[in-house]
Amino acid sequence: MNTYDDKAVLSATALAKQVELHGESITILASASLTVARGESVAIVGASGSGKSTLLSLLAGLDIPSEGEVMLLGRPLSELDEDQRAALRRDRVGFVFQNFQLLAQLSALENVMLPLELAGRRDAVQVATQMLTRVGLAHRLKHYPRHLSGGEQQRVALARAFVIHPPLLFADEPTGNLDPVHGRQIIDLLFQLNAEEGTALVLVTHDNELAGRCDAIYRLVDGTLVGAGR
Ligand SMILES: Nc1ncnc2c1ncn2[C@@H]1O[C@H](COP(=O)(O)OP(=O)(O)OP(=O)(O)O)[C@@H](O)[C@H]1O
Ligand SMILES: [Mg+2]
């Protein structure tokens, strides 16, 4: 049973990650706790190497913590195996990356159809076309990623992430490869979709404008989460 609806879509309790390096154990994340409510937007900020991507990987179940627990959409990740975690992400979680990560051999339309086809949807063409229209790319359906600008590629990535109506979306530096003008457009679109869809956002960013528009800001300093400002 999913009981997250009236609570958090995501919560982490005392998450820690140690790695062995040259026979020595080093802590790259120490006892991080956070909660993300339904529809809430949360920024995770911090210097390079402070542990932001590490935390995101743990929250998304892409990596296993040394200590602590993550509840993702009502499921304790420690009780799921790798395949179950992958299925939960595929069906319920959106991802957006700094370098877009579109499939190069698929057109914009085919990239957005993919999550629908994985879900067995027979109306993938229509639904993906509608989603690309929503992000302003109705005139670029047949383009391959190499023929799209960075901003356009990130719009396709947003369409791909939102097309399954995920309750939660993770993004790691979504504006990191874009100039300020196109970065701004992507931020506007992200928050528009967040508002329209009620999708909770967890955004790792160096971008102060992006962080400033979130409901909460968590800061990482050398692997320690130093608190949330709201
Ligand atoms: N598997 C690993 N083994 C050893 N050290 C690691 C490993 N993964 C990450 N680290 C170290 O942990 C620290 C945090 O890395 P992480 O990638 O989470 O930082 P980040 O905050 O995302 O940085 P950036 O802003 O540059 O992306 C870094 O010092 C990194 O070198
Ligand atoms: Mg990183």
Image (spheres, rainbow, N blue to C red):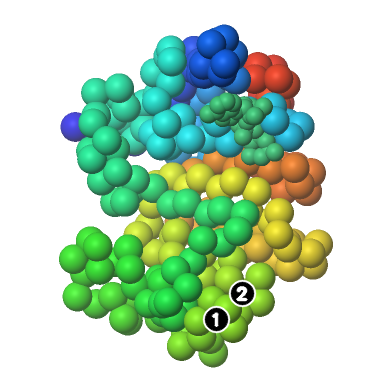
Instruction: Please name the amino acid that badge 2 sits on.
Output: Glu
Q: Disc number at residue 150?
A: none
Name the residue: 42% across, 31% down: 63
> Quick check: 104 above or below 164?
below
> Quick check: 81 above or below 92?
above
Closer to the N terminus: mark 1 or mark 2?
Answer: 1
Q: Looking at the image, in which quadrant does ligand 1 appear? A: top right
| Most foreground residue, 41 or 120 | 120
At mark 2, the secondary structure is: helix
Residue found farthest to the top = 24
3D distance between C-alphas at marks 1 and 2: 8 Å
Instruction: Please name the amino acid that badge 1 sits on.
Output: Leu
Name the residue: 54% across, 89% down: 139
| Most foreground residue, 191 or 123 | 123
Task: State which quadrant residue 71 falls in.
Answer: top left
Q: Quadrant of the C terminus?
A: top right
Residue 213 visible in the displayed image: no
Q: Quadrant of the N terminus?
A: top left
Name the residue: 25% across, 46% down: 87
| Most foreground residue, 228 or 219 | 219
Q: Nearer the viewer, mark 1 or mark 2?
A: 2
Q: Relative to residue 88, is residue 60 drawn left or right?
A: right
Q: Position of residue 227 (x, y in %)?
A: 67, 19
Q: Are marks 1 and 2 in contact (CB under 8 Å)?
A: yes
Task: State which quadrant residue 220 falls in.
Answer: top right
Q: Mark 2 = which residue?
A: 152
Q: Mark 1 = which residue?
A: 137
Q: Position of residue 180 (x, y in %)?
A: 81, 62
> Quick check: 187 above or below 50?
below
Name the residue: 59% across, 83% down: 147
Q: Position of residue 74 (x, y in %)?
A: 31, 30
Sort mark 2 into few (<14), some (14-19) or many (20+) by Cα contacts within 10 Å: many
